[in-house]
Image (cartoon, rainbow, N blue to C red):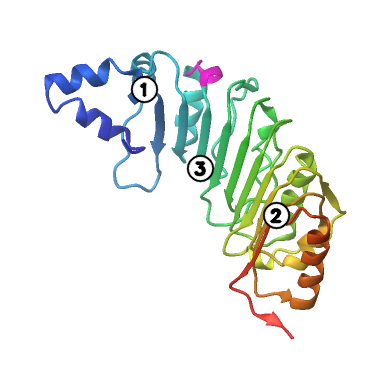
Amino acid sequence: INDDTQTLIRLTNVCHSWREFLLSTPLFWQHFVLYGRKNAPVVRFWNPQKLDVWHERADFAFRVLTINCDIPQRVQSLYECYHGWASLAELRFCVDEHVPALPESAALELTNLKTLRVAFRNREESNVDMWELARINCPNLQTLEVEGLFSSIYFPTAPHLKTLVFRLQSASSACAFTVHSALTQYRHSLDKLSITGPFAGSLAVSDPVVVMPNLRTLRLRVDGEKWLEVLKLECVERVHIESSLIDGAWMYHWATQRDAQRSLREFRLSDCHVKE
């Protein structure tokens, strides 16, 4: 079953047996998608009653909630009507900067949330301070993924975060500062870090060194030298760098140092033109 809720509804109309089976199996209904695009030819109608029916069929426990919508009123209606946040294991935002990230009244209690994905679909970089993800209480969050154009995000407290992924659509100094802030915030718990995207190659950084004592896997599609100077990796095991800005001698020296610590097991350079 894909993410389109209409597919599941069509399957219930195949025959009586299919309908009986689907309606009696909460697992099929545990992913709810709130969708709606302003510029779409047809905007499907959504209302609180649909949410209630879907929630009941999921045995009142959504596991995944996807907000793929750029209509603020529709998103705000979801916040006001839905009361099952505590059961979510994964939350996905795919919106623009005008959509409210959180209810206006209070923070969200997502005590079982393991994965948070945020994708900004706005075409121009803008200040998204309204995206105060810090107001999301997710003490058990393990994976955080951020994609698109953004200038500033307030990240949630996540003492057990293991994986941090950035897919960047901008190389601005504000974007670099936001990435560096996230690395500083999660430096003690991270096991895997990935910074990629079509503009990541020119992302510059000159902030203080970040000590990452537990990072095991690193993937960078950025200026490798600058970021490897900023990141102090004490026990990294796997490093993959995609860049055209590589000083071969400097990179060899860096890898030799990691190898001397007997931690580095895999080191890969790809799509790069090594300077003489």
Label 3, secondary structure: give it.
strand
Write the start and end of the magenta stretch as one range.
82-87
* Percent coordinates x, y for residue 211 in the rendering: 84, 48
Dot label at residue 175: 2
Q: Nearer the viewer, residue 9 or 96?
A: 9
Kind of residue at disc 3: Val
The answer to the question of whether label 2 and label 1 lie on touching residues, with beta carbons closer than 8 A, is no
The residue at which mark 3 appears reads as 95
For marks 3 and 2, give the CA distance.
18 Å
Residue 205 at least partly seen: no
**Label 2 crowd bin: few (<14), some (14–19), many (20+), radius 10 Å:** many
Which image quadrant is residue 59 in?
top left
Q: Nearer the viewer, residue 136 or 73?
A: 136
* Percent coordinates x, y for residue 79 in the rendering: 52, 23
Is 42 left, or right, of 110 in this rendering?
A: left
Pick whichever of labels 2 and 1 is earlier in the sequence.
1
Kind of residue at disc 1: Leu
Which image quadrant is residue 171 in?
bottom right
The residue at which mark 1 appears reads as 27
Kind of residue at disc 2: Cys
Residue drawn 77% across the image and 67% down it: 225
Residue drawn 14% across the image and 19% down it: 17
Is 68 left, or right, of 116 in this rendering?
A: left
Q: Total number of numbered labels? A: 3
Label 1, secondary structure: give it.
helix
For marks 2 and 1, give the CA distance.
38 Å
Name the quadrant of the N terminus: top left
**Label 1 crowd bin: few (<14), some (14–19), many (20+), radius 10 Å:** some
